[in-house]
Image: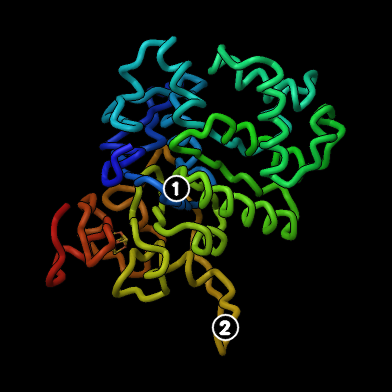
Amino acid sequence: MVEDQPVLDVRNASIAYQTARGPVLAARDVSLTVYPHEIVGLIGESGSGKSTLAYGIMRLLKNGARLVQGEIRILGRDVYAMQKEELRAFRWLHMSMVFQSAMNALNPVLTIEDQIIDTLQSHQPQMTRREASLRARELAEMVRIDASRLSAYPHELSGGMRQRFVIAIAIALEPALVIMDEPTTALDVVVQRSILDQIREIQKVKGFSILFISHDFSLVAEFASRIAVMYAGRIVEVSASGLLDGDSLKHHPYTVGLWNAIPQLRARQLTLSGIPGSPPDIQNLPSGCAFHPRCTLADDTCRTSVPDRWSRGKSVIECHRFEVEEGATHE
Ligand code: SF4
């Protein structure tokens, strides 16, 4: 792995679902990079296109969805140029995914140990069953579950244990990139915290990169070093998480709206404000900037013209307000 080369490089990717009314773009002209050892958060409301993008990166799109523009490279390899067999070997070895629901991700009729062994042996056929079994024990230890639980079937485990084993399977082959799609959403806050701490510890030791998808801004702000904000299929801002705040002069109005909806534990005054309106119907997007019906700063330009991407300091923002700003550069 070349240290300054991105592990994940999504360039101008658009993903469309084929519907009776024609193709509908769920991800529109998305560009995103994840570098070695980096944790990048991807946030946005339900239906913003986060999971579609994740499935698109893994080339696991279903229900008539397909990449219609752009390219997706992992470790420099074009995922959509690979033959089926090549892709099968590449997936899990170099890129893996932790799905939203552990129950759906695990096979209900196989023990956890058999599922880990299957994953290992299907990508490393030279590995003996005994070696794979020893590796399964190491992985159980890594996610802090007693090895005796490897003989259990998924339904015999708690939600937290199942999710830990799903993470163990995702990192079994030590891929360069792990996509985590709302990995702790179904779990209670205490288990969520414990699993995130473990992911961070393992990530530090193993050094893989993570694309962490969530609708929970506060969680992602704490966990990731950079955050990409997605709205109506577009990434409207990418900023270092340490730079994020509710300053409307520095950030996209949608990012500011999400920020202001988080309770700030150290703030003197607790004033929360939501974002007015609801996310748009992606089959019928508003003209110009898709956020304009909900944006308090919208003007006529916003209603008629799609904003370009502008670099502002270390952030990249898609908003007309930054076009006129001194020092802002066109991406
Ligand atoms: Fe608001 Fe206009 Fe910026 Fe869109 S382009 S976020 S409507 S100010």
Q: Which residue is drawn at 56% across and 12% down?
A: 125
Q: How far apart are marks 1 and 2 (CA)?
A: 33 Å
| Quarter of the figure with residue 216 | bottom right
Q: In this view, does 89 lie to the left or right of 143?
A: left
What x and y, as percent, mark residue 66?
Answer: 39, 23
Q: In this view, does 51 lie to the left or right of 293?
A: right
Q: Residue at x 60, y 35 (%)?
A: 99
**39, 261: nearer the viewer:** 39
Report which residue position mark 2 lands on: 266
Residue, far bottom: 268
Q: Which residue is drawn at 53% across and 17% down?
A: 123
**202, 300: nearer the viewer:** 202
What x and y, as percent, mark residue 271?
Answer: 56, 81
**Amino acid type at mark 2:** Arg
Which element type, helix, strand or loop, lies under badge 1?
A: loop
* Image quarter in which the N terminus is found: top left
Q: Does the residue labelled 1 lie within 8 Å of ligand 1?
A: no
The first of marks 1 and 2 along the sequence is 2
Report which residue position mark 1 lands on: 280
Q: In this view, does 315 lie above or below 210?
A: below
Query: Ligand 1 quadrant?
Result: bottom left
Tag nearer the camera, 1 or 2: 2
